[in-house]
Amino acid sequence: MRDLAGELKLPVLINIHNVTEAKEYTDRIVGMRYGRIIFDDVPAQLDQAAMDQIYAGSPHADRAKDGAAA
């Protein structure tokens, strides 16, 4: 995929939930949580602190913090 994208000079966007594979196969990772971008950087910068922000908590608690109706 990387070779083909390079030959055609096209970006490739994939949606992958396996962090290990994302770190191995991508040049950039965008981590989202409930529709908000939490992390946007190169895979080497995706540390445990960023992972905790992306995956911790619950949707209900996040909405309550934002003042949205529960």
Image: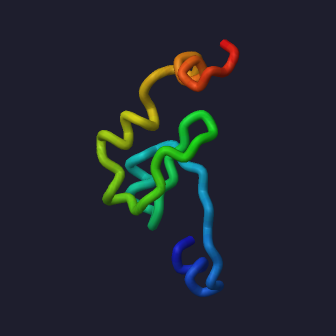
Is 61 located above or below residue 43 in the figure? Answer: above
Q: Quadrant of the C terminus?
A: top right
Whether residue 51 sits left or right of residue 38 in the image: it is left
Residue 35 image offset from top left, x and y in percent: 63, 39
Is 53 located above or below residue 58 in the figure? Answer: below
Q: Residue furthest right?
A: 69
Whether residue 25 sits left or right of residue 35 in the image: it is left
Name the residue at 49% across, 44% down: 38
Residue 21 image offset from top left, x and y in percent: 43, 52
Q: Quadrant of the N terminus?
A: bottom right
Name the residue at 66% across, 21% down: 68
Q: Residue furthest top?
A: 70
Name the residue at 58% across, 17% down: 64
Name the residue at 60% across, 78% down: 5
Q: Residue furthest front?
A: 67
The front one of 35 and 43 is 35
- Number of numbered discs overlaid on the protein picture: 0
